[in-house]
Image (cartoon, grey):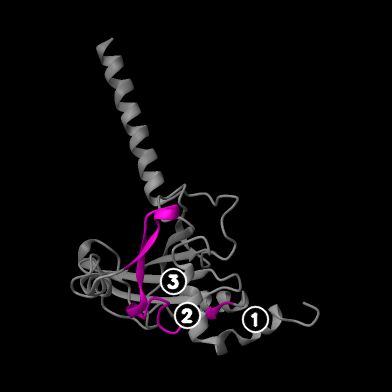
Amino acid sequence: MRTQLSIIICILCICIGCGKKEEEYGVTYRPSDFPEILAPPKDATEIRYSSPETGGIVKGAYSISFWLNEEYPAKNTIKQIQRYLQSQDCVRVEGSVLSDLSTMHIIEGEGLNKKVVDITQEFKEDLKKTQRVIETQWQKPHPQANYADIVYSTWAEEWITPDDDKVSVVLDYYFPDKGYEGNRLWGHLTVFTPSSWMYPHVQRYKEKHPEKFKDSNEIEKSPGD
């Protein structure tokens, strides 16, 4: 009886553990309500889909992660992702929508108690260290970044969709001496919808660069509106 009970407990522990892992890293199937803008590149493997419900990420955000076998510097993958986003009428961001840290702030509280608090200089410096480089070229991580000891090259880019979503593209190559194959490319695509914390920064970027969104603005203000 004790043996059977021990076996049952072990099975339950394994199931609970798998459930936590599934929730932490997303799910292997594409949820029905997943944003269409997020599409993995051709030949991608080990695809995971994450949302606030399936992956524990922030509200209003959705992401997919995947692996690809392509030698550095992954020209085919980059070209494929860029062409796809262009076909969806997305606009490429110069740098990042968070490049201007001087106007960043934090909203604290809820309802009538909600207030805007300016972030400290220390917070800005920490953000610079941990934020992925957004310069549309391969870069080494900041030495103090929390992923610097495993990633040896990072490529990142941001786009804004016609619906004011922000799409973040991050590609990484990992140190072979950490147990990874040299041609194993890891990709991570995230969309921040207007219901996410990123929306005000997207709007600020559009206000600063109206020329980039001229065509879309003309469509929105077409005759008869």
Label 2 belongs to which residue? 205
In the foreground, 106 or 21: 106
Q: Residue furthest bottom?
A: 211
The amino acid pointed to by label 1 is Ser
Residue 131 bears which disc, if any?
Answer: none
Assess whether residue 64 is covered by the magenta stretch: no
Would you identify the image quadrant in which residue 176 lies?
bottom left
First in sequence: mark 3 vs mark 1: 3
In the foreground, 102 or 9: 102
Residue 216 bears which disc, if any?
Answer: 1
- Residue 41, can we see it? yes
**Alpha-carbon distance for marks 3 and 1?**
22 Å
Q: Residue furthest front?
A: 112
- Residue 198, image x, y percentages: 45, 67
- The magenta-colored residue range is 90-117
The amino acid pointed to by label 3 is Val
* Vertical order, 188 against 157 (above or below): above
**Alpha-carbon distance for marks 2 and 3?**
18 Å
Q: Write the residue at 38% across / 61% down.
A: 115
Name the element at disc 3: strand
Label 3 belongs to which residue? 169
Q: Residues within 10 Å of mark 1 (few under 14, many from 20)?
A: few
- Residue 183, can we see it? no
Q: Residue furthest right?
A: 224
* Vertical order, 29 against 192 (above or below): above
